[in-house]
Amino acid sequence: MVIEGLDGAGKRTLADGLTAALGAKGASVASLAFPRYGKSVHADLVREALHRGHGDLADSVYGMAVLYALDRSGAADDIRALLDAHDVVLLDRYVASNAAYAAARLRQDAAGEVVKWVWELEVGRFGLPRPDAHLLLRVAPAVAAERAERRAEAEAARERDSFETDDGLQRRCAAVYDELAASGWLAPWHVLDGVAGVDHEALAAALLSSG
Ligand SMILES: Nc1ncnc2c1ncn2[C@@H]1O[C@H](COP(=O)(O)OP(=O)(O)OP(=O)(O)O)[C@@H](O)[C@H]1O
Ligand SMILES: Cc1cn([C@H]2C[C@H](O)[C@@H](COP(=O)(O)O)O2)c(=O)[nH]c1=O
């Protein structure tokens, strides 16, 4: 089960709440967040590039997308092991993040070349497991930006990066996410209203009853 959405949408908060609610219902849950900062050299290079490290690396849409994909590729065996050992595996961002952000950066839509390329690279070539479903935590870009800004003020280590401060990118990314969800890209999508708030217990019950 993959949680997707804009920077600051509340994905980590949802993952934590859902993990607790699923656990309270007796389900065994494992979770993983991408990029795997501090655990993968590719993820650490991403973080450094997003904070203006490594020259013009962050300017390359395909170069950055390859780093995100290599981070996931390095986690593929772990994901398979987690799937064997747990009832639910929750992923905070996955392949669809690469599709949405790369398309938004290149001003393409979900039917564009780069979205196909991400699928071919990550699913076709790297053989990453396909998710059962996506949860799109949908909030207006302005709301996500405000949440990310407030978080940056509260947490010294969470200074906003070059994607998070780019309002135009976040707006385009929101549109691509809507298109990916509407087309059922890679797996079915369920859209959650992240402004009204998500009832974690009800969502956990619905997920468990859907098998
Ligand atoms: N439903 C909500 N209402 C108000 N604030 C929220 C809500 N959900 C999360 N927040 C707050 O918004 C900020 C961003 O949330 P969170 O870290 O969960 O987002 P995220 O989508 O994981 O972000 P990123 O992708 O940038 O890591 C946090 O300060 C969090 O406490
Ligand atoms: C996994 C992944 C992420 N991104 C983008 C999305 C964010 O703007 C940054 C960093 O992610 P975080 O959740 O804020 O830590 O990277 C991407 O473009 N492609 C991906 O695969």
Image (cartoon, grey):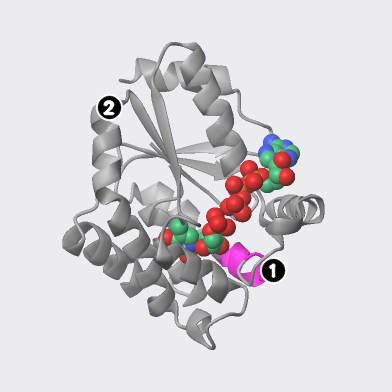
User: x, y (%) of residue 69?
Assistant: 34, 63
Q: Local crowd at mark 1 within 10 Å, few (<14), some, or many (≥20)?
A: some
Q: Quarter containing ligand 1?
A: top right
* Front residue of 34 and 122: 34
User: x, y (%) of residue 142?
Assistant: 73, 56
State the residue lying farthest toward the top: 25
Residue identifier under label 2 = 85
Residue at x-position 38% and y-position 20% = 28
Quarter of the rendering containing residue 1: top left
Nearer to us of marks 1 and 2 is: 2
Residue 25's label in the rendered image is none
* Front residue of 196 and 166: 166
Residue 134 within the segment the image draws in magenta: no
Compared across the picture, whether 147 is left or right of 68 comes to right
- Is residue 124 visible in the rendered image? The answer is yes
Residue 168 within the segment the image draws in magenta: yes
Residue at x-position 26% and y-position 61% = 122
Going by the numbered disc 1, the residue's amino acid type is Thr
Going by the numbered disc 2, the residue's amino acid type is Ala
Residue identifier under label 1 = 165
Residue at x-position 54% and y-position 67% = 47
User: x, y (%) of residue 102?
Assistant: 44, 70
Residue at x-position 66% and y-position 31% = 197
User: Bounds of the magenta span?
Assistant: 164-172
What's the magenta bit mostly, secondary-structure-wise?
Answer: helix
Q: For the C terminus, which image quadrant?
A: top left
Q: How many marks?
A: 2
